């Protein structure tokens, strides 16, 4: 094969490769919420960031969220501040008892099917829409520090028409903010959690010592008797 033939063949291969690339255009992300309630009714735990706390403080609604906030020990040993799901309803034949810790002995897979505590499933309405967390604002799009990721490919809103360039830009910016704020929270929360736990333990010990110092000799004798009996039973 002559040099001219080789150059012609190489040129043709490059053209074929170019056409092959052009035949696979990059898929454009488009999203519009359809109010299907799938992600709101069965999504948890929902991570909370400093951005959310600051927004709630600014809007004067922090106290409204306090009953729903909790520290969640993740399967990877990390911890998140979350909106805790409501405890699952009792199964058929079981009696309803006092509320249990939603995460006690419950797998993460089961948690993903637990209802958000601030979503009205009957009316298909978010009860805190204007104050909803960043995680809800950016769903189903997330940012991992390098790339944007669709975390729920089955979301019926994906592919819906109506998303403008401005909408897409805003959603991407929100996803980036979510990544940054969640990273900040996950760095700070273990330290804060440990400090607060130590403070609580120290306060409890101090209260116990104060209570012991105020006990009469008779009360102390009774307490010693209780401890002694407990050791004998063991």
Image (tube, rainbow, N blue to C red):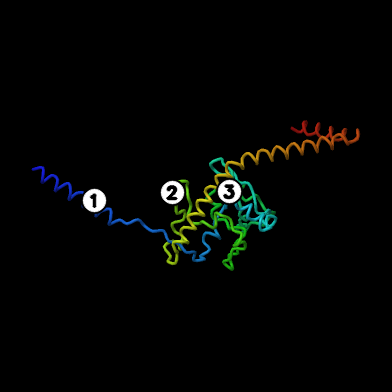
Instruction: Estimate how packed mark 3 is, as few (under 14), some (14 to 19) or many (20 or more) residues with alpha carbons within 10 Å.
Output: few
Q: Secondary structure at mark 1?
A: helix
Q: Are marks 3 and 2 in contact (CB under 8 Å)?
A: no
Residue for badge 1: 17
Mark positioned earlier in the residue sequence (3 or 2): 3
Residue for badge 2: 147
Residue for badge 3: 106
20 displayed left or right of 179: left
Q: Residue at x 91, y 35 (%)?
A: 216
Q: Are marks 1 and 2 in contact (CB under 8 Å)?
A: no
Q: Among all residues in the image, which is located at the extreme bottom?
A: 123
Name the quadrant of the N terminus. top left
Mark positioned earlier in the residue sequence (1 or 3): 1
Q: Are marks 1 and 3 in contact (CB under 8 Å)?
A: no
Locate residue 226, reporting x and y percent: 82, 35
Q: Secondary structure at mark 2?
A: loop
Instruction: Estimate how packed mark 2 is, as few (under 14), some (14 to 19) or many (20 or more) residues with alpha carbons within 10 Å.
Output: few
- Between marks 1 and 2, how big is the CA–CA gap? 26 Å
Q: Is residue 103 above or below residue 199?
A: below
Locate residue 230, reporting x and y percent: 78, 34
Q: Nearer the viewer, residue 226 or 112?
A: 112
Q: Nearer the viewer, residue 21 or 123?
A: 21
Name the quadrant of the C terminus. top right
């Amino acid at each position: 094969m002559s040099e001219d033939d080789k150059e012609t063949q190489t040129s043709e291969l490059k053209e074929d490769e170019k056409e092959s690339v052009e035949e696979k255009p990059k898929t454009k992300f488009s999203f519009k919420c359809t109010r299907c309630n799938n992600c709101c009714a069965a999504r948890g735990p929902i991570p909370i960031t400093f951005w959310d706390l600051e927004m709630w403080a600014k809007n004067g609604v922090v106290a409204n969220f306090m009953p729903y906030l909790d520290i969640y020990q993740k399967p990877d040993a990390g911890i998140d501040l979350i909106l805790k799901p409501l405890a699952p309803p009792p199964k058929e034949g079981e009696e309803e008892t006092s509320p249990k810790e939603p995460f006690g002995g419950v797998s993460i897979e089961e948690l993903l099917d637990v209802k958000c505590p601030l979503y009205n499933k009957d009316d298909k309405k978010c009860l805190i829409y204007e104050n909803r967390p960043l995680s809800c604002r950016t769903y189903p799009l997330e940012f991992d520090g390098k790339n944007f990721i669709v975390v729920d490919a089955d979301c019926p809103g994906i592919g819906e028409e109506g998303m403008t360039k401005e909408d897409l830009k805003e959603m991407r910016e929100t996803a980036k903010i979510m990544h940054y704020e969640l990273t900040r929270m996950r760095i700070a929360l273990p330290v804060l959690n440990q400090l607060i736990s130590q403070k609580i333990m120290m306060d409890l010990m101090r209260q116990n010592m104060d209570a012991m110092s105020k006990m009469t000799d008779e009360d102390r004798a009774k307490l010693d008797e209780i401890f002694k009996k407990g050791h004998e039973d063991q």
